[in-house]
Amino acid sequence: MKKTLAMIFAFLLTAYSMPYSPVSATEGKGDVNADGKFSTADIVSLQKWLLAESNTKLADWQAGDFSADEKLDAQDLCLMRQALVSPAENSPLEKLVGMTYADAVQNGYISKSEYNYQIAGELKSAIEEKMGRPLDYSVDRFYLVHSDAIGLSDTTQYLYNAATKDVYVVNTETNMNRATWYWKGSKAALYGIDNNTTVQNQFLDAMEFYGITEIYYSIGANKLVNNADMVATFVKNAYARNMKVYLLTGEKTWLYEDTYQTAIYRVFDRVEEYNQLVDADARIAGVSYDVEVWTNSEFNWKNNDSARYQQIKFIETAQKYADSKNLSVSYCLPFWIPRYTYTDDDGTVKNVYDTITKISNNTILMAYRDSASAVEKLVAQVQTGAEKSALDYAESNDCNLEIALQAAETSEGDHVTFYEEEKEHVGYINSAIAEMQSDLAEYRYRTTFAIHQAIPLYEHYLTK
C-alpha cells in the first residue's frame, strides 16, 4: 500500500511547480491545516498523514474528505491536488482588483464617497507596505468596499484605492475625519503661523488636540503656485501628523458660466501645477469650495429658481473637472438647503440638496448651533419642503455629509456657536462631537465633522 501511495505522491509533487489559484478556506474544502487558506501545504500535510508519519496531525481532517466517504485515502489526495491546480473562478473581491473607480461604483462594489476615517497608524503602515511607497494624498483615494454586495462577510472591512486599483484590509479602525477652515487673515499673520516653525508646530498641536485630520487652507489659486515653498512647508508638517490639506477658495459671485474659468478651471489647474512642483508629502488633496451665492443679493437665491439651477450647474461642472484631475472636492452649504427646489432642463422640479448629493461625493452643511442636540436636529429632521432629512439625502445618494460646527465668536448670537462653551472649558466641542457621533452612529460611514475655524481653536488651545 505504501508503495502505491509513494507513486501517487511522486506524481502529485509535480503539481507544486505548476501554476494554481489558491482557494479561500471559506469557499471549499482542503484546508486541513486550518490556517485559513487551501494551498500546497495542505497536500503535504495529508500526504505525510497518509504515510503515517508520527509527528503529523491534521487540524481539520474533514476538510480533506473530498470524496465525502468519511475517511481519508489516496483518492482524496488526488482530488485535493486536482482542486488546487484547477483554475479557480475569481471572487468579486479579486475582480475588484484592477477595476477602475467608475466601474467599481457602477457595479456597486464600493462607495461613491471617500472613506471617512483617517488613514493612520497600523492601517497606514499596512497600506504603505503593500503599495511599496508612502501615501500621496494627491492621488491616493480610498473607498469602502461593500462587502455584502460582493458576497463577503461583513466581519472584515476592505478599502479600494482608486490610484492603485487594489484592495486593502482595514486592520484597525482609526478616527473619523474632522476638518477645519484655516482662513489666513490678519491673525494668522500676527501669530506667524506660516513663517515661524515653532508657532506652526504649536498651531498643528492645537489641531491635533481638536481631532483635526483635514485642513482647508485659504490661499489664492495663483498664490498657491507663486508661494509653493511656503505652502509646501505647511503641508509637509501637516502630512507628518497624518493630516490632509485642501485649497480653500470661493467667492459669492461664482455662479454663472462666465465665472467658470476663474472659479473652476484655473483653481484645479493651479492645484495640479502646484502638486507637480513639490514632493509627494507636500501635495494638496483637492479643493474645498466656500461659495456662498445665497448671500449675494444680486442673485436673490431663495426666490430665484434660475439661480438655484445655476448653482447645480456650477457644482456639476466643478465635480466633473475635479474628477478629470483626480482631485477631491467638497462644497460648503447652509443647513436649510434641503428646503429648496429647482426646475431642471426637462421641466422636472427637483430638490436642490438631493441633486447635489447625487452629483458630489462630499458636502459640508453649516449646522451652527451651540449644543449637540440642536445641531443634530438641523441635519436629522425633515425640513419644510423636503422629503427627507439632510442625513437621509446624503445616505441614499452615497455622499458624505460633513456636519460643520461654529467655534468662532460671532455677531449672530451665542446660540449659533460653541465659542462661549469652549472659552469656559477648552475641549468642550470635542465632547459635543463625540456625543453626536454616538447619536448618529447609524450614519457613521456617511458623516464627518468640521469646526469653523482654525484660528479660534488655536486661541482656545493657548489658554489650556
Image: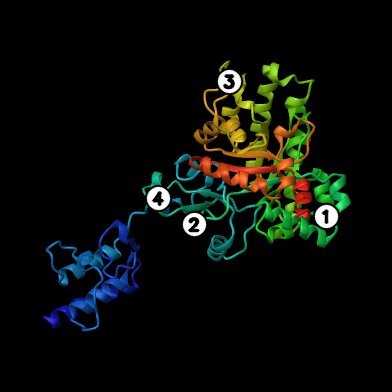
Label 1 close to label 4 by CB (< 8 Å): no
Q: Earlier in the sequence, mark 4 or mark 3?
A: 4
Q: Is residue 65 visible?
A: yes
Q: Is residue 429 above or below residue 240?
A: above
Looking at the image, tell me whether mark 1 or mark 4 is earlier in sequence order. 4
The crowd level at tag 3 (other Cα within 10 Å; few <14, some 14-19, many 20+) is few
Q: Is residue 392 above or below residue 298?
A: below
Relative side of 360 to 152, left or right = right
Res 154 label: 4
Q: Earlier in the sequence, mark 4 or mark 2?
A: 4
* Quadrant position of residue 265: top right
State the residue at coordinates (14%, 82%): 2
Task: Label 4: state its secondary structure.
Answer: loop
Residue count near mark 4 (Cα–Cα under 10 Å), binned few <14, some 14–19, many ≥20: few
Separation of residues labelled 2 and 1 (CA atoms): 35 Å
- Where is residue 421 shown, x and y percent of the image? 71, 42
Task: Name the side, left or right, on which 431 lies relative to 225.
Answer: left
Of labels 3 and 2, earlier in sequence is: 2
Q: Position of residue 197 (x, y in %)?
A: 82, 62
Residue underneath mark 1: 194
Q: Secondary structure at mark 3?
A: loop
**Which amino acid is tagged 2?**
Val
In the picture, measured across the screen, residue 355 lies left or right of residue 53, that is right
Work out whether mark 3 precedes mark 1 in sequence or the reverse, and give the earlier one.
1
The amino acid beneath tag 4 is Asp
Q: Which mark is residue 170?
A: 2
Q: Which residue is mark 3?
A: 384
Q: Hey, what amino acid is under mark 1?
A: Asp
All told, the count of numbered labels is 4
